[in-house]
Image (cartoon, grey):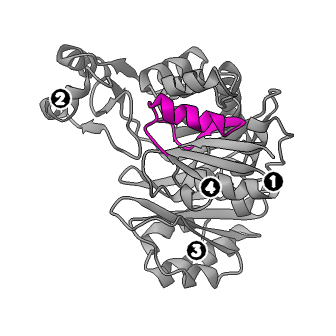
Amino acid sequence: MTTVGILGGGQLARMLALSGAPLGLRFRVLDTVADACAGQFAPLIVGDYRDESALAEFASQVDVATFDFENVPAESAHWLSARIPVFPNPRALGIAQDRLAEKTLFRELGIPVPDFADVPDRAALDAAVAAIGTPCILKTRRLGYDGKGQFRIKSPGDVEAAWDALGAQAATVGLILEGFVPFERELSVVAVRGRDGEFRAWPLTENWHVDGVLSASLAPARVDAGMAGRAYAHARALADALDYVGVFALELFCRDGVLLANELAPRVHNSGHWTIEGSETSQFQNHLRAVLGLPLGDTRMVGHACMLNWIGAMPDANGVLREPGGHWHDYGKEPRAGRKVGHATLRAEAPVELAEALTRVGAALGREAQVAPVVAMLGA
């Protein structure tokens, strides 16, 4: 029986383990904390990702390794790859961990990006703001996610405050300045590439964020075939350039009909959670198929779907479960402000039916504001 190792024990590892059960797979998880929620479904090794003794124990128990999140140290992935197969490869992981390397690769591949500049020191920040203009965003090159490690510079008068907030990290994780994109829509391509180079993508997804954290995802996004084709082409170019194996997400801004790449997530992705019930093969099972060298599953949709994220605490499940197409996911986490604790997916055969279900769920849970932009996009 094949054992898959997962570095990181959060909800993504948990859902990977659940999706792998029908394939007869076993799992081992390495995480830094003993209460990692994936440990409720798979044996958990507690240790630091840089601890070679913990990595050696992990490697001795698995046949192949993958990741739950992108901030696993790339050097740990390199260490493991000398001993067991690791997918995605350490180079892909390393590039995705560094916003400057990531944006540079996008540009080299002809994928449009906002203006950006490396910020090694305060003088470089002043020069970058002068060149790019305001508004702009100062970000850490590494370790930022869900809106963390960022400072929005609205005018030149904000530069000092931005440096006070993030400047100390210039010498450790590095900083990058990016031009602010007054986007009209946020989209993502969730795609998978197999060991043999086969590439598949799920329908383009539209996303809404609140305070930098994903709030809702709608699939399929209401875009024309030309825009969808450009998004898929960008994702495929990226996957082939990195010799990528597994599922990834390419996050995109849409402005005046132009797609601008925001970032690469080298893992199964929050905006792809709807695929569990809304597609022929979920992102989680296709990720496992890819890293194991199995044939990839069909990514076509089953109806129309919307995923709602639960942040901080779980709401009452009844409002979702009363719906014929309502599906509930509790990650088994303790409530905590800002923490992703679960999600729900609503699925329907037609857009108007999905809009009606979302309206009922929003009213039942007191989440009218969360569902409103999706309902508006569906034209209801």
The numbered dot on residue 152 is none
Instruction: Please state if 186 lies on the left or on the right of 61 as rendered.
Output: left
x and y percentages locating residue 128 in the rendered image: 28, 18
User: CB atoms at circles 2 and 4 under 8 Å apart?
Assistant: no
Residue positioned 56% across, 56% down in the render: 38
Quarter-of-image position of residue 89? top right
Q: CA distance from mark 4 to mark 3?
A: 34 Å
| x and y percentages locating residue 297 in the rendered image | 83, 47
Residue 42 is tagged as 4
Residue 6 colored in magenta in the image: no
Q: Which residue is mark 1?
A: 24
Name the amino acid, label 2: Trp
Whichever of callouts 4 and 3 sits on the residue coming sooner in the sequence is 4
Q: Residues within 10 Å of mark 3 (few under 14, many from 20)?
A: many
Of the image marks 1 and 2, the number of the one nearer the N terminus? 1
Of pointers 1 and 4, the one earlier in the residue sequence: 1
Q: Nearer the viewer, mark 2 or mark 4?
A: 4
Specify the segment rendered in magenta.
Answer: 46-71
